[in-house]
Amino acid sequence: MKISKTRHLGVLACCLGAGAALAQDGPPPGMPQLPPGVLAQINLGKAGLLGSFYSNEQWGTTQGRFGQSRFTIGTATAPFASTTGYKDGSTDLVLPLSALKALPDGKSYLRFGVMYVKPNGARNQVEVDGNNPSVSVQYMTFPNPNTMLSFGVFAEHTDVRDVVSGAMAPRDGYGIRADLLHKFNDNWGISVRGEYSWGETDLQIPAIGYQHVQGDDRFYTQVELIGSYDSSSFSAVPQGWSLHPTFGINFQRNFLEATVDSFGAVSSGLVGETEDYGMVWASLGLEQMVAPGQWGFNASLGVEHEYVNDLDAFVDESTYIVGSVGASMRTRSGQQVVVGYTRHQGVNGNRWNQTLLASLNFSF
């Protein structure tokens, strides 16, 4: 199961070369005064912080590894099953749609999001395919040009199946999410995300007549420290480009209800009532700053390492090289199109994932 990974999603004027000056000094004489929410988005977008807010990159990576590992453990612990040679691989299509509605105060917005993810597992001992739609509504406010606060709700559905065994584990859930973005100097800012999801998973193995319905709740938190340097602040950066060094950490805990399965046994999760996962990462990204109506390109390279993974019993992989390339264009009317490709490659060669992204963002 691989859940959404939407990278480099900005709003309004993330790629305007004059964004920082507008946000800090206001528009030139004769130009209409922009609303404070627009100025803040220009400022936070150029700093790379709005990209972190709109991205589900690390969140999706975490959900995918939970899902793949659950199926792998279930397969490997079945009677007479092999316990060696397990690998994970997945190619995912990610299609997000995001819309902003400005509120009368000029500094606040409602964001409506729709996401569809199509995971396609590689041919291995465990091969997981699925469909993952979700919807969300968030309230965003910008109390000053350097800060954003957001709170919202979401609903999600996960429909995944192991093609090899026929096992399936659909999950329905809903939850709350809160975010903080803050740019604390000219070159660095922080992005903080936290959410809680209440859900229920229905594990089914039709071949043996097995079913286990149980509560499956999730707590997730993430922090990213993001830098932004152009040629004026770091001479090695090409003119018209922005360099984004990023350092991040996340943590997730799943809470699994102990219930009676169709065989009459009481159990919770495959490794107990809770499942923990956490990783740290560092990357260096380069983003082209362009005017509206032009395509801007981006690329990044980094590394991530799992510092905890309760479900790593059968796939020997904890460190990954991560690379991405992409392009985006913001039209003069404010719409933004984003396309991208990301690859997570385990250094031991036992797990990989690649994502194809195509998204549309607009305001109304």
Image (spheres, grey):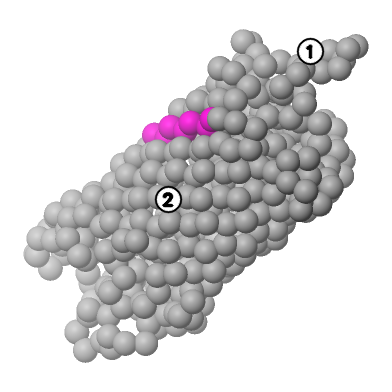
Q: In this view, does 236 lie to the left or right of 188?
A: right
Residue 294, percent from left and from top: 87, 44
> Does 173 sit above or below residue 325?
above
Could you tell which of marks 2 and 1 lies nearer the N-terminus?
A: 1
Per the image, the residue denoted by label 1 is 33
Per the image, the residue denoted by label 2 is 249
Residue 240, percent from left and from top: 83, 45
Q: Residue 264 carries which label?
A: none
Question: Which picture quadrant has residue 43?
Answer: top right
Instruction: Tell me the SS state at disc 2.
Output: strand
Which residue is found at the position 70% from the left and 58% from the top? 299
Main SS of residues in magenta: strand
The residues colored magenta run 176-182
Residue 63, percent from left and from top: 41, 57
Sort mark 2 into few (<14), some (14-19) or many (20+) by Cα contacts within 10 Å: some
Whether residue 85 is visible, yes or no, is: yes
Which residue is found at the position 85% from the left and 33% from the top? 332
What amino acid is found at the position of numbered circle 1 in the picture? Answer: Gln
Residue 75, percent from left and from top: 29, 78
Q: Which label lies toward us, 2 or 1?
A: 2
Which residue is found at the position 69% from the left and 43% from the top? 229
Is residue 150 highlighted in magenta?
no
Whether residue 357 is visible, yes or no, is: no
> Does 298 sit above or below residue 348?
above
> Does 152 sit above or below residue 214?
above
